[in-house]
Image (cartoon, grey):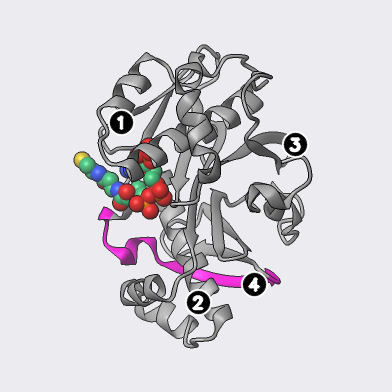
Amino acid sequence: MWPALLPQPRTLQLPLHRGEIRWDATVAVAQAAQFAVWETQSANVLGASEIQALSALQFPRRRQSYLLGRVAAKAALLHGFKAADPREVEIRRGVFEQPVVYHPFRTPISLSLTHTDRTAAAVVTAEEHPMGIDLEEVEIARVEIIRTTLTAQERNHFPGTSAETLAEITAAWTAKEALSKVLKCGMMTPMEILELATFRPLGPAVWEGTFSHFGQYRSYSWQVGDQVLSLVLPKNSTLAAPADVTPWIQLLSPLAETAGA
Ligand SMILES: CC(C)(COP(=O)(O)OP(=O)(O)OC[C@H]1O[C@@H](n2cnc3c(N)ncnc32)[C@H](O)[C@@H]1OP(=O)(O)O)[C@@H](O)C(=O)NCCC(=O)NCCS
């Protein structure tokens, strides 16, 4: 439960089925439009080590991404694991800069985080069922850089330059970044290792990917406006209605565009 006195970040619960077992994931989003609010509320959201980490950050852009990322992560954690106080969970940094959750719950928790200048997003699951997340904005300049990182096989897959291809290439990149977070290696590893084996549209603005060297994972990517969000999850877990982009539109739309926001 998110405290009633704090603004409520948007959350999306994703039931994932794996045979008879159900694993829930929660995705949450914090928007830069509310950064000023979160900055004034930071003492009510952050734990002691996080307040210290925030105060050590000098650049406004990084202060924003740090704080919004923690807000999104805590919203997902409190929604998924039923705590009442966001200060009870702290997100610290591992030696590979991966997020590590310190918390009072009994369950080991997997957290993955991402941020752009507009939005921070987090996905939380039980550690037994790791997932990764990545969010990017679709920009021609970024796509040109992404193209230079594609393997020969991937280049054959994305030959065009249409607007759809720009979104698709960005989606493919986010799928690989999300995988790199599950693996904890980040993008410091040779790009061939993260190669996509397949990347196919499931419907308008939705793609599904598999990986050449990590057959145990699959990706889903959703485009909302000029943003693309990818999740990587264990391949044999089934996500209900992955081709439906509506929940992702509700999650990622600018705050003024949805009722009650
Ligand atoms: C992980 C990485 C791909 C993120 O890409 P990005 O597009 O710049 O940033 P995003 O906003 O999508 O994600 C940032 C978040 O990824 C997470 N992250 C960083 N490194 C990570 C790793 N090795 N594994 C998993 N997650 C990681 C962090 O939570 C970070 O947010 P935070 O710093 O606010 O906690 C990129 O930062 C990278 O390649 N890092 C390598 C880090 C590394 O290997 N360091 C070794 C130092 S010994």
Looking at the image, residue 32 sits to the left or right of residue 184; the answer is right
The alpha-carbon separation of the residues under discs 1 and 4 comes to: 35 Å
Taking 76 as reference, is 120 above or below it?
below
* Three-letter residue code for mark 3: Glu
* Three-letter residue code for mark 2: Leu
* Three-letter residue code for mark 1: Gly
Q: Give the residue at x 74% y 49%.
A: 258
Write down the residue under mark 2: 166
- The answer to whether mark 1 is within 8 Å of ligand 1 is yes
| Local SS, label 4 | strand
Foreground: 108 or 46?
Answer: 46
Q: Nearer the viewer, mark 1 or mark 2?
A: 2
Taking 38 as reference, is 46 above or below it?
above
Q: Are marks 1 and 4 in contact (CB under 8 Å)?
A: no
Q: Quadrant of residue 245?
A: bottom right
Label 2 or label 4, whichever comes before in sequence order: 2
* Three-letter residue code for mark 4: Pro
- Rendering coords of residue 206 (x, y %): 65, 65
Query: Which contiguous range is marked in magenta?
Result: 188-204
Label 1 or label 4, whichever comes before in sequence order: 1
The alpha-carbon separation of the residues under discs 2 and 4 comes to: 14 Å
Residue 20 numbered tag: 3
Of the four image quadrants, the one with ligand 1 is: top left
| Local SS, label 3 | loop
| Local SS, label 1 | loop
Residue 201 numbered tag: 4
Q: Are marks 1 and 2 in contact (CB under 8 Å)?
A: no
| Crowd band around label 3 with a 10 angstrom C-alpha radius: few (<14), some (14–19), many (20+) | few
Foreground: 144 or 57?
Answer: 57
